[in-house]
Structure formats: C-alpha cells, structure tokens
Amino acid sequence: MLDYDLLMKEVSNIKNCYFIYSYDAKLVKNFLESIEKKLILRDLKQFNYINMKFDNSFDINYFFECCDTIPMMQDKKVIVIENALFLRNDYDNKEFISKLKEYLGNLPSYCIIVFYYVFENKDKNKDNLKIFSKFGQICNIQELKGDNFYREVSKIFLSNRVNISKNLIIYFCSIIINDFFYIENEIKKLKFFVDEREVTRKDIDDIIPKSLENNVFVLINNVLDKNLNKSMVSFRELILSGNDFNYIFSMLSNQFSKFLDVKLLLEEGFSFEDIMKKTRINQYSLNNFIKLSKKYSLKNIMDVIDAFLDLEYKIRISTDADPLLEFEILLISVCR
C-alpha cells in the first residue's frame, strides 16, 4: 500500500494502473500533473490525456473504448477517472466491479489509468482498495501531519518563490487549515502581499485566517492562565465564527488530551523528538504545549479537564441545559 510520498516516487517509474483514495484532492492533482508532464506532449494532450467523472452518466463501455484506442503519435496515453466511488468499501454494485476487473486483467500496455476518490468524512473513510491490488498500485493518502505536512507546504512556498524562514513556515503550518488547495491559495495571497521582501510573522497574522485548532489552543491557554476576560472573548469568537458548539467542545477535548499526553511524557523524561514521534504533534504546537506545561502542575491540568468532563456529562444527560450558558459558567468557575 502506497502513501503520498511513495506515490510521488512512482513518477520515476510509472505503472499502468493506480487506485488512489485520498483526504485531499490537491495531493492527487500533484501526482496527475507530474505524470502528465512526464508522459504527455502539450500539443497532443486533447488526444492522449482523458479525464472522466464517475457519476450517473458514466459509460463503462465508452471507458473501455478509450482505453483500447491507441495513443496519438506517442507511446502512452493517460486516462483519469475522478470520483471513483467503487473505491469506497460501501460500494455495492458487484456487477460493475466484476466487469471492471475483467477488463483490467488485460489492460493495454500503452494505457496509464488513474482511478481516484477524495473522501470528505475523515471518521468514515474506509476504502475498498485491496480488491484491486492485483491490477495495479493502490494508495491511501491520509492527512499529512508533522514533518510530512511541513515538507509539502515548504515545496509550495519554494515553487511560488516566497522569501520565508524555516521557523515561519513551521508557524504557518501550525495555524493553517489542512487543505492543500486552500494552502496554495493562501501562499499566493501572501506572496502578492509581501512581493519580494521577506515574510514576517505579522504578515502571516494579518493575511492568513487561523485554523479552528489554533483558536482552540488560544482558548485553552487563556483558561489555564485563569484569564477570564480573554477566555470569554476567545470562546465567543469561536462561536461567532460559525463553528458548531459540539464540534468546538470535541476540539477542546482533543487538545486537552494532547496537552495531558505531553505533560505526562515530559514528567517521564522523554525528549522533545521522542514526544513529537509519539504524539505526532507538529513542532510549533508541541513547543507551545511544552511552554504551557512548564507553567502548570499536573493537578492544575487535571482539575480543568475534570471540570470539562463534568460539563460534557451534564449537557449530554440534560434536555433543557443551555450549552453556551453552561460553558460560560464553567469558564467563570475555572478562571477564579
């Protein structure tokens, strides 16, 4: 099973068939653009690079005809099938899959086919890739994190010729939404803003909207600082930004869980590098967690987490509790 890094290495030795299941469409596009650049002459693209969408109008026999048609004045042709729903594990048209497998067993050598599907729900992203493993390369691209995320973002800065330091790329990675089409657009916007000069942190703060995860971290910092005013402002900004309360609460729980893991690992004597490997928290966020953990005892952290868990239970069992009001009462309580 390939991941994103291994998939991109395939460009040096392209196989006949790829089945890609990804959380991010831009990462798939990177692969497609790379093989197009290597295999297809620009003047002949309309003949030798065919893109189809798997929807209600998809005609499998027409697809077979396209595959069987030899390339125009080239050795290879590329056929891309986007939205390949049959790569999901809940696809139940067995007749279609059987017919497709039968054809792929005798795929013409000049034909390069890429099937891909971009999943939206990260909690329900089970794939059906293994049933196609004997017909080509299968690849599951999960969310890039840590060094992998940093490297990919760095490539976009480099390709756009943005003058920015390594530390500020790490900071950028810590606040940006993990969506590479969005990331590329924000980097282009930043490039337009700074022109040829070097990017500063203020530039990033002024131009780039911060991710929900970063804003939740700010709230946690304010709560642990027992700064009631800033905690209230942070919480209300999260709500006014249109985020669902339950989602915000789940993000808070997730961040507190990470924070507690970092605190416990530090007390056990683990190094920064070991903690980063174990938790897969990016470098900038981990630095923030460590700075916070040095300010508070394990008991302080556990007391706040217990208060949040008590509120979660209260809201879950009560039919008439106002979650927003209860959360603000909690903030008053823990920030005293």
Image: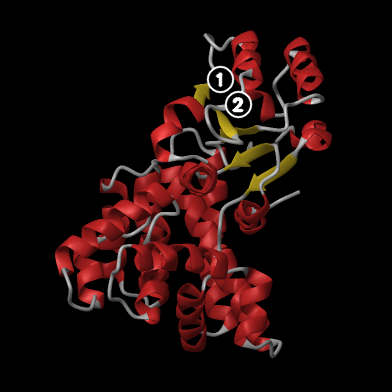
**What label sits on residue 290 in the rendered view?**
none
Quadrant location of the C terminus in the rendered image: bottom left
The residue tagged 1 is 54
Q: Looking at the picture, which amino acid does disc 1 mark?
A: Phe
**Image x and y of residue 309, in percent:** 57, 57
Question: Does residue 186 lie above or below 297 as drawn?
Answer: above
Closer to the chain start, of discs 1 and 2, is 1
Residue found at the far front of this picture: 73
**For residue 329, side relative to residue 286 (left or right):** left
Q: Looking at the picture, which amino acid does disc 2 mark?
A: Ala
> Quarter-wise, where is residue 188 in the image?
bottom left
Question: Does residue 176 lie above or below 16 as drawn?
Answer: below
Q: Could you tell me which secondary element the residue under label 2 belongs to?
A: loop
Residue neighbourhood size for the residue with mark 1, other residues' Cα within 10 Å, grouped as few (<14), some (14–19), many (≥20) = some
- Tell which of 232 and 57 is nearer to you: 57
Q: Could you tell me which secondary element the residue under label 1 belongs to?
A: loop
**What label sits on residue 84 in the rendered view?**
2
